[in-house]
């Protein structure tokens, strides 16, 4: 087992100004004193993992990381510098368009953050209200201009489709408007109705119906339109450019199927590489041990104040179960799995261990196999969750 430092680091910031109707991630509104307590606890957790971490990728997700104020960001960024964690070739921070300021953007860029992921979701005011988003259409454009003017040359925006009340025509106009912005990356997610979310309760109450055919049409139009615009799909919901005006980017991976501006951090997950996860509810996988922090900010802070990480659980999966999990994650990518890479990573031959399952997916038209690789087809990517289940049934 490798003793090299872990090269990927995720940090969860669990605060939002308002909980969105669809969101099942751990996040909540919080008084200012709890946010500061979280920042202090996060610095302690950074100190605990720093000897074993020299990140090539860093990702601040949430929640809304851009809710942190300048002083709080200065505290975190100073800890990164002091602990030698400011080494990432790709350093992403998620932002809400309502919480981007020029001072904050400049602070992040000067510290080495070089990629922003902005949660736009829609340009339509009525759909933004339907989703419970706190930003406006105008704020999207204003925030985007701030990011560009402060030196960010790698920007992703998140969009959502199959939103209740969203027509195919409105979705097509959303795609076109996003393309006019000129971002390097687009993440486009179908609405998922998670338990314990307001949108799920509204669905159960019969306030709207789910139109699966419309959702499929929206997905097909998305894939076609972005390909026409020069984006390459490299994962079910993720599309990136290979070139743009400005500084050159570092390729995401050695595979030619992965575009230049792919999110390198997420590729780490889909390829099953080690990654630390810090903050309340954050998951990690390090040297065969999978673990997760408590999804409770108060408990998280209490544990770090006692000098220990706030782990809810830790487990080591049997080799075959871990390999099946890896197969499922990796097949979310358009490139699928190079068979030799999978065997090198897991010690298990994908084509032998899951021969029956692979043949079934091929018969359905959901997958294709070459002498060197196995991947889902366009149709298979649309039903990737169902395909993944075949590798998880052990």
Image: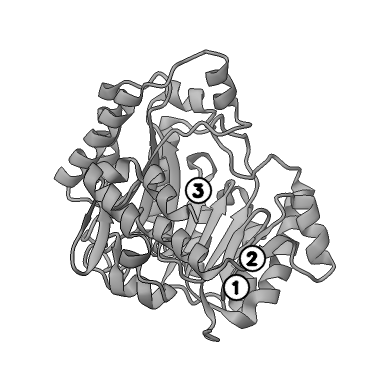
Q: Secondary structure at mark 2?
A: helix
Label 3 and label 2: CA atoms lie apart by 16 Å
Is residue 332 or residue 237 the one in the foreground?
332
Please identify the quarter of the rendering in which residue 18 is found.
top right
User: Looking at the rendered structure, which numbered label has been put on residue 302?
Assistant: none
- What residue is pinned by disc 3? 95
Task: Mark 3 and mark 2 in contact? Answer it, CB < 8 Å.
Answer: no
Q: Is residue 151 above or below residue 219?
A: below
- What residue is pinned by disc 1? 80
Q: Residues within 10 Å of mark 1 (few under 14, many from 20)?
A: some
State the image coordinates of residue 19 (x, y, percent, origin top left): 61, 34
Q: Earlier in the sequence, mark 3 or mark 1?
A: 1
Would residue 337 appear left or right of 245 to someone viewing this image?
right
State the image coordinates of residue 118 (x, y, percent, origin top left): 44, 46
Label 1 and label 2: CA atoms lie apart by 6 Å
- What residue is pinned by disc 2? 76
Task: Mark 1 and mark 2 in contact? Answer it, CB < 8 Å.
Answer: yes
Which residue appears at 22% of the width and 60% of the height?
242
Q: Residues within 10 Å of mark 3 (few under 14, many from 20)?
A: many
Residue 333 appears in the figure:
no
Q: Secondary structure at mark 3?
A: strand
Is residue 227 or residue 99 the one in the foreground?
227
Please identify the quarter of the rendering in which residue 338 is found.
bottom left
State the image coordinates of residue 31 (x, y, percent, origin top left): 76, 43
Q: Is residue 272 above or below residue 393?
A: below
């Amino acid at each position: 087992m490798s003793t090299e430092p872990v090269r990927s680091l995720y940090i969860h910031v669990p605060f939002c100004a308002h909980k969105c109707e669809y969101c099942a991630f751990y996040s909540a509104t919080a008084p200012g004193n709890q946010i500061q307590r979280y920042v202090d606890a996060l610095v302690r957790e950074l100190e605990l993992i720093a000897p074993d971490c020299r990140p090539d990728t860093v990702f601040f997700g949430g929640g809304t990381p851009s809710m942190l104020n300048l002083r709080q960001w200065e505290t975190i960024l100073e800890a990164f510098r002091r602990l030698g964690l400011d080494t990432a070739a790709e350093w992403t921070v998620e932002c809400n368009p309502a919480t981007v300021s020029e001072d904050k953007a400049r602070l992040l860029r000067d510290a080495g953050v070089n990629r922003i992921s902005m949660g736009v979701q829609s340009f339509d005011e009525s759909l933004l209200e339907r989703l419970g988003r706190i930003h406006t259409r105008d704020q999207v454009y204003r925030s985007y201009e701030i990011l560009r003017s402060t030196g960010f040359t790698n920007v992703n925006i998140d969009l959502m489709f199959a939103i209740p009340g969203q027509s195919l025509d409105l979705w097509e106009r959303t795609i076109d408007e996003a393309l006019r912005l000129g971002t390097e990356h687009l993440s486009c997610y179908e609405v998922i109705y998670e338990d314990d979310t307001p949108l799920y309760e509204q669905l159960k109450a019969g306030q709207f119906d789910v139109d699966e055919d419309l959702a499929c049409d929206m997905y097909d139009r998305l894939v076609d339109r972005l390909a026409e615009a020069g984006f390459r799909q490299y994962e079910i919901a993720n599309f990136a450019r290979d070139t743009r005006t400005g500084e050159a980017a570092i390729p995401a991976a050695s595979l030619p199927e992965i575009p230049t501006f792919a999110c390198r951090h997420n590729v780490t997950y889909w390829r099953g590489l080690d990654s630390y996860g810090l903050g309340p509810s954050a998951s990690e996988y390090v040297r065969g041990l999978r673990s997760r922090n408590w999804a409770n900010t108060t408990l998280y802070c209490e544990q770090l104040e006692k000098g220990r990480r706030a782990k809810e659980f830790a487990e080591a999966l049997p080799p075959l179960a871990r390999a099946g999990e890896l197969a499922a994650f990796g097949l979310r990518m358009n490139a699928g799995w190079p068979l030799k890479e999978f065997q090198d990573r897991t010690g298990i031959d994908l084509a032998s261990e899951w021969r029956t399952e692979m043949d079934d997916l091929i018969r359905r038209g959901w997958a294709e196999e070459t002498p060197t690789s196995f991947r889902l087809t366009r149709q298979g990517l649309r039903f990737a969750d169902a395909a993944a289940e075949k590798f998880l049934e052990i």
